[in-house]
Image (tube, rainbow, N blue to C red):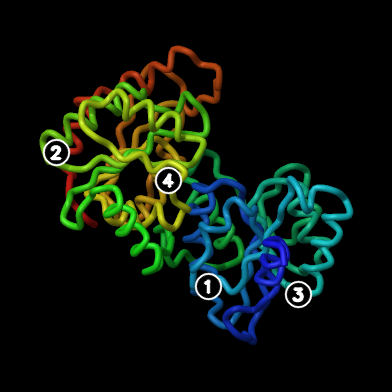
Amino acid sequence: MSEMEKNDIHDDSDTRGSRQGKRMLIIEVNWLGDVLFTTPFIHSVRHANADSYIACLIHPRCREMLEGNPDIDEIIEYDEERKHKSPIGKLKLILKLRDKKFDTAFILHRSFTKAAIAYLAGARKRIGYATKNRKALLTCLAEEGEYPTHKVEYFLNLARAYGIAPASRSYRFFVSDADREHAKKYFAENGIGPDTKIVALCPGGNWDPKRWSAENFARFADTISARTGAAIVITGGIKDKALGLKIKDMMKTPALVSCGDTNLKQLGAIFESSGLVVANDTGSMHIAVSVGAPVIALFGPTDPAITGPYGEGSYRVIARQESCDVPCYDLLCKDNRCMAAISVDDVLRAADEMFGKRS
């Protein structure tokens, strides 16, 4: 049996038994950090609907962000780049959703297609923002505020529009004991003992202007390791491997490059074991916040008031954006002065205050 067939079987199973209340579908967003921003919303919906059956429709790359979440009964994949890209693929997905008889759908994504899927899937109540000319497809409209708000609140507004008060504003990401054992074994195999202090770096970012320079990460890592004796672990996905190795090569002290060696849950376990995480504005940064690691978040072209760490946790934001309009989406920016204005000394001062702290 193929992995795709196994995933389909898992998706169709009701993993937490039969619930007698409403059948609710939450149509998710497509990026790792954004999915974490939705977890306070999901928790609020569950808190107000303890007997309801709640399923989430999500892109396969984001599935891990919700796995193990006790607020969710089922995760259904919407593979819009491959399996469900064609009209026939979308029709098969819609028929699958119709069979599940959802009566309520929250459309967290702003696209017209996602709202159309909720409509065609037969959900009688459809809650969302009236974006992308989709007002006619919705039965309950959430009002967008006049000023930008944090994305956690943006999603919680959908709960408010449906009469649900927020039950939490903190991220919910769940790491298993198996993930923790994997991290412990991984450290041991790479010469990091159980009593060693760990500083984790997240130097990646889904576009270059969001990244603090490799040189700065290397200088920071050398200094903090010399001051504290901490082991340096450079984290990220496989796409960040070259960057991680570049930083390691610039360093005077040893470093473990874990980029591509872990899944998201195992990465969360690494962060749980860390005395400090230094990260750009990435999904990894929000995972670190969600597991309670002390986090220094570095912001340049993006606005921490919209996508910064939120809710409970031990975190510090460093942003030097005085000369630029934020948010800025100039992906070809060569100057990158907002990130360049964050000095190594800025981060070291924050690290001296935060290292080893827990929320």
Question: Residue 165 in the image: x percent, y percent?
Answer: 49, 66
Q: Answer with mark 4 or mark 1, whichever residue precedes in sequence.
A: 1
Residue 46, labelled with which disc?
1
The quadrant the C terminus occupies is bottom left
The local secondary structure at tag 2 comes to: helix
Badge 3 amino acid:
Lys
User: Disc 3 designates what residue?
Assistant: 100
User: Disc 2 designates what residue?
Assistant: 352
Q: CA distance from mark 3 to mark 2?
A: 53 Å
The residue sitting at 43% across, 19% down in the picture is 324
* Contact flag, marks 4 and 3 (Cβ < 8 Å): no
User: Disc 4 designates what residue?
Assistant: 284
Q: CA distance from mark 1 to mark 2?
A: 39 Å
Q: In the depicted view, which residue is nearer to us: 130 or 343?
A: 343
Q: Residues within 10 Å of mark 3 (few under 14, many from 20)?
A: some
Q: CA distance from mark 1 to mark 3?
A: 18 Å
Q: Nearer the viewer, mark 1 or mark 2?
A: 2
